[in-house]
Amino acid sequence: MKPLVFSLFVMLQCIVTNAQDRLLTRNGSISFYSKGPLEDIEANTQTAVSVLDKKTGQIEFSVLVKSFTFEKALMQEHFNEDYLESDKFPKSTFKGHIEDLDKVSFDKDGKYTVSVTGELTIHGQSRTLATPATLTILKGTALADAQFEIALSDYQITIPSLVKDKISKTVKIALHLKYEAQAQP
């Protein structure tokens, strides 16, 4: 019986240790902005889920496309039905890592500029993304901020010919994620 108890203790310790290495957010902010001759397009969500592993630098996030809100309801409807086809492609995701994790001390308050590389998937299309990001460590929490631009054509998002000259072909995306230690099991 003692070997079984010892094995269970070791397994539990590994789970607890692994959980301490992971930071989590369930209410990350993602916004996008596109300036166009006809109309600017802007939307945001506060529901992105993300996990950051402090030891490996692995970072993942996921957001439901329908969670983005717009100032105009008709714009939101077109975004979900015509452009992102959110019934067919309900999530956008990113899976990657911090390239220069050795720059970051998660135990010391400070601001760290890092490089993040990974696969961004939007509208069922995945592309490699490399972008600078800022990690701010403050009293045990980590704030991650990044801004980058994507081309709609890279993700096979088509603009109807009726408005193609009135809508920008690129979109600026901004992320603000506030991570906290993952709850212990």
Image (cartoon, grey):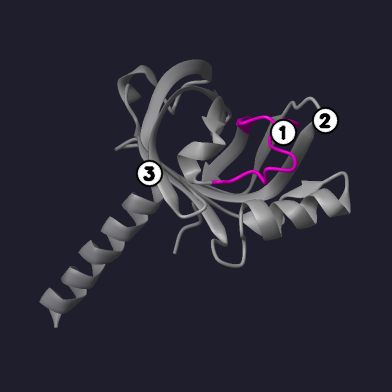
**Residue type, label 1:** Ile
The residue that mark 1 highlights is 167
What residue span does the magenta drawing correspond to? Answer: 157-174
2 and 1 marks in contact (CB < 8 Å): yes
Splitting the image into 4 quarters, where does residue 10 fall? bottom left
> Which residue is located at x 67 percent, y 41 percent?
29
Magenta span includes 41: no
Taking depth in this image into account, of 79 and 27 the one nearest to the observer is: 79
> Which residue is located at x 78 percent, y 57 percent?
77
Q: Dot 1: what SS? A: loop
- Identify the image quadrant of the C terminus: bottom left
Q: Dot 3: what SS? A: loop
Splitting the image into 4 quarters, where does residue 145 fall? top right
3 and 2 marks in contact (CB < 8 Å): no
Q: Position of residue 89 (x, y in %)?
A: 54, 61
**Residue type, label 3:** Asp
* Disc with the residue nearer the chain's start (2 vs 1): 2
- Residues packed near mark 2 inside 10 Å, few (<14), some (14 to 19) or many (20 plus): few
- The CA span between labels 3 and 1 is 43 Å
> Would residue 69 appear left or right of 85 to someone viewing this image?
right
The residue that mark 3 highlights is 21
> Which residue is located at x 59 percent, y 37 percent?
177
The residue that mark 2 highlights is 38
> Would residue 116 appear left or right of 135 to someone viewing this image?
left
Q: Dot 2: what SS? A: loop
